[in-house]
Image: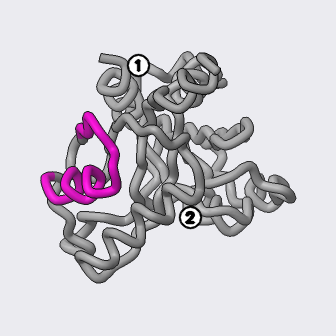
Amino acid sequence: MSQRRASATSRHRAVALLRGINVGGKNKLPMAELIEILQALGLQNVRTYIQSGNAVFDSKRKPSARLGEDIAASIDERHGFRPGVVLVGVDELEQSIKANPFPEVESEPKTLHLFFLAQTPKHPDLESLERLRAPDERFHLEKRVLYLHAPSGIGRSKLATGIERHLGVPVTARNWRTVLAVRDLATT
């Protein structure tokens, strides 16, 4: 009985990574309004990092695709657009940082990007991604994260633009600096 009661009151800290908001003047969503939306869904201790849609929160609900859909639907209801939402548990975020296959480039945080996947891809087409890769690019898929080292930037990277299509699952990307800042926000 006491274990059941403990699990009913346990909290889960998670990160919501929203895709495609506040980019190029489109899909505007002030962070204060994102906080209100998340709180209206019963999420607590909501904090955000920069305007690109990074939110940390506590919840009685485990991070799940359903919670991500609820967040997207609430944004759509209030703002008329439905962003992609990838939820990541704090432990999963920490593990993705530790598993970085390119530690030698961590000192160049704008060249290292983590693409967080909505779910583990069932049939990723890594051969096609390899064909899109520029000579100076490297990538590695690990569960729900694709790591991309793109020293020339991802703005013109054919590999970066093909990731979602060739993995077959929704993704959202963050550079190394943002990933570390979100982790710090989630663990303080």
68 to 153, vertically: above or below: below
Quadrant holding the C terminus: top left
| Mark 2 lies on residue | 161
Q: Is residue 39 magenta?
A: yes
- Using residue 132 as the reference point, say whether residue 155 is left or right of it: left
**In the rendered structure, which segment of residues is drawn in magenta?**
32-47
Most distant residue in the front direction? 1
Asked whether residue 136 is in view, the answer is: no
Please report contact status of discs 2 and 1: CB closer than 8 Å, yes or no: no
Asked whether residue 103 is in view, the answer is: yes
What is the CA distance from the residue labelled 2 to the residue labelled 1? 24 Å
Question: Splitting the image into 4 quarters, where does residue 104 fall?
Answer: top right
| Mark 1 lies on residue | 107
Query: At label 2, which amino acid type do we have?
Result: Thr
Query: At label 1, which amino acid type do we have?
Result: Ser
> Which residue is at a point 33% across and 21% down the rendered structure image?
184
Q: Position of residue 162 (x, y in %)?
A: 63, 64
